[in-house]
Amino acid sequence: LEDAREAAAFAERYRSDNGTEWTGDFDEELRSRFCACDKGLPYRPTTDSPHERFHKDMNAGVRAALYQSGAPYNWCSMVAKHWTHNRNRLATGCDGLTPFQRRYGSKYDEKVGPLVPFGCSAYFHVEKDDRRKFDCLGKAGIITGYCKQGYLVLDLPIAHESNWKDLRIRMTRDVNIRQNEFPLRQWNLCDLE
């Protein structure tokens, strides 16, 4: 239901393929917020082909990013957010604008940080409060996404030491990125649950 409330906060209309995930509580919540619903034919992807095409592209992009980075399958939601972020700043529509430009009225500012592949190597600055006097000033990590002023970076030493149970993600712009290095590939994490 939380997803329905978030969707209704900015949506005036939504489209569904009439599948079971769109009926029941979700549908009632959106209708209570005066959100109109266009229902297509079930099991007919051509009813709403632009959205079906987007999902096909996203699934292919997530699959490729998981393979390229060496990330485990259960990280697919992180990868999907990362893929969508990059796509919204790169793909142009018929009007020549990206989804980011249509929404915010300006191009993506590369000064915030260039777009990079999921899981690429990143060395980030460790703040004074998080280290002792003679500890290293930086740590190894991987890019897992973006934040307003920089990147989301997974702290690799902590994740590896905890057998991938403690995934500490740092928000930082103090980062040195190596786009062609994918450190997760050295561990076989594909079957990690």
Image (cartoon, grey):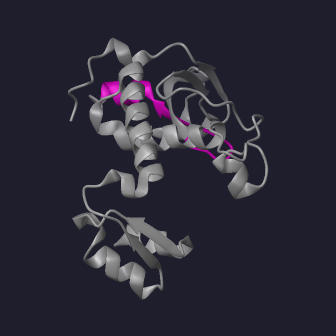
Q: Quadrant of the N terminus?
A: bottom left
Q: Is residue 142 magenta?
A: no
Q: Quadrant of residue 72?
A: top left
The front one of 125 and 103 is 103
Classify residue 79 as left or right of residue 24: right
**In this view, 177 is above or below 115:** above
User: Going 50% across and 73% down the picture, which residue do you hit?
Assistant: 13
On the question of residue 39 being in view, the answer is yes
Can you give x and y, in whole percent of width and height, for residue 188 in the image?
A: 26, 17
Q: Is residue 149 magenta?
A: yes
Can you give x and y, in whole percent of width and height, for residue 3 in the image?
A: 39, 67
**In this view, 12 is above or below 45:** below
User: Going 77% across and 44% down the picture, which residue do you hit?
Assistant: 107
User: Going 53% across and 26% down the picture, which residue do you hit?
Assistant: 117
Q: Quadrant of the C terminus?
A: top left
User: Going 42% across and 57% down the picture, which residue do you hit?
Assistant: 48
Q: Quadrant of residue 174?
A: top right
Can you give x and y, in whole percent of width and height, for residue 10 in the image?
A: 56, 72
Q: Which residues are magenta?
A: 146-161
